[in-house]
Image: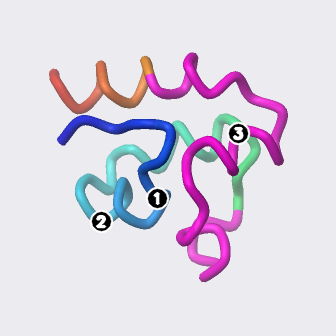
């Protein structure tokens, strides 16, 4: 799976639960909340003040390992 800024948080978590710490690290502590799982990665980053490209790089590197 390759994550883009438009990938939904829920899709990422469903594909690989070991990505959860990356969201917790950015301050997204409500991962089970229905609204958070339906947000795109870009939307979540905007809300939490995290550069989307930085998180994209971390997640894609993690998933390719």
Dominant SS type (magenta): helix
Q: Is residue 52 or residue 59 the one in the foreground?
A: 52
Q: Are marks 2 and 1 in contact (CB under 8 Å)?
A: no
Q: Position of residue 33 (x, y in %)?
A: 64, 78
Q: Residue at x 26, y 53 (%)?
A: 16
- Furthest toward the front, the residue is 6
Question: Which quarter of the rendering shows the N terminus?
Answer: top left
Q: What stretch of residues is rendered in magenta?
A: 30-56
Asked where in the image residue 51 lies, by quadrant, the reply is top right
Does dot 1 land on a helix, a strand or a loop? loop
- Residue position for label 2: 14
Residue 24 is left or right of residue 48, and the answer is: left
- Residue position for label 1: 8
- Residue position for label 3: 45
Does dot 3 land on a helix, a strand or a loop? helix
Q: Is residue 62 or residue 46 the one in the foreground?
A: 46
Question: Which quarter of the rendering shows the C terminus?
Answer: top left
């Amino acid at each position: 799976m390759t994550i883009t800024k438009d990938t939904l948080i829920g899709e990422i978590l469903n594909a690989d639960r070991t990505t959860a710490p990356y969201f917790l690290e950015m301050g997204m502590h409500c991962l089970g909340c229905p609204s958070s799982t339906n947000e795109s990665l870009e939307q979540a980053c905007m809300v939490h003040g995290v550069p989307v490209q930085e998180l994209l790089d971390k997640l894609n590197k993690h998933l390719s390992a």
